Image (cartoon, rainbow, N blue to C red):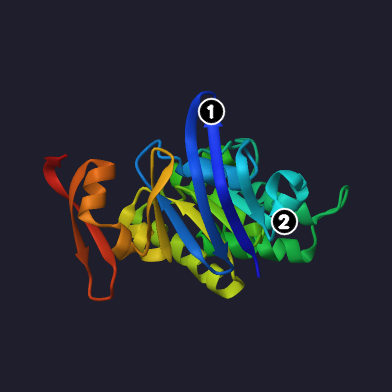
Amino acid sequence: MTVLGFCNLRVTYGERVAVESYNDILHSGEWVCVIGPNGAGKSSVLRAAAGLIAYSGSVAVDQKEIPATSARWRARHIAFVPQSPLIPLDMTVEEYVFLGRNPYIPYFGVETVSDREIVSDVLHSLDLAGFERRFLATLSGGEIQRLVIARALAQQAPVLLLDEPTSALDIGHQQHALELVDRLRRERGLTVVSAMHDLTLAGMYADRLVLMHEGRCVAHGTAADVLRPENLSKYYGVSARVHREPDGTIVVIPNRGERN
């Protein structure tokens, strides 16, 4: 069992407060999606959990405070898919995904048969089989995004952080990637935190939504609880219809030509 906890998280950039008093607890197998307009603080919550930025308050995995852990420990326990990853264009696809196995390879050691099987399985799962020898400079934006997800999944960390993981993907690969994450979190008990702009997709896959505005959580709960026309109007400044499908899926449909 893995528990990811946030307690009074506060993130600042100079004088600007990006996140204020963020609190949540996630358990193994749970998927929480953080939503909100641009600048709401979504990415800062994920970057704090990944140990990439300074903050006050507490972020802990299994009661281990993130700043007190080593980089190697974090890499074994937390996998992060950033919104704008740095891409080494002279590296091959296989070399890049193998970076996800580095936390398990001894210093001056080499990858094992098991490492190779893990990388091969992940590449196949994300429609990247056959790309192994291609250089990253030759890939499209959508292929790069799938590759970054592949590297994170190759880490096999119990906590997975996804910052806009489908923004460059076509609709087929969006579904493919999110279905894979959903399957793995159910099979392996992954704890997933994502930040997404597509509200319909967010509601389809996450157990809970957290709506942020100006650094604060202003609504949380199921998609039906959070994705209400009044919330979309107040915090996104948009007029939208919210439709419930027979299977319970919540679909957000902006009203053309109308903006609050």
Say whether residue 68 is left or right of residue 174: right
Q: Exactly how many numbered labels are in the figure?
A: 2
Name the residue at 40% across, 39% down. 40
Q: Dot 2 corresponds to which residue?
A: 76
Say whether residue 192 is left or right of residue 256: right
Disc nearer the start of the sequence (1/2): 1
Q: Nearer the viewer, residue 238 or 142?
A: 238
Q: Which picture quadrant has residue 234? A: top left
Q: Which picture quadrant has residue 117? A: bottom right
Image quadrant holding the N terminus, namely bottom right
State the mark number for residue 13: 1
**Which tag is nearer the camera, tag 1 or tag 2?**
1
As drawn, the residue found furthest toward the left would be 257
Relative to 191, is 214 above or below?
above
> Residue 151: image x %, image y %?
62, 52
Say whether residue 166 is visible. yes
> Residue 30: image x %, image y %?
52, 66
State the mark number for residue 215: none
> Residue 184: image x %, image y %?
55, 69
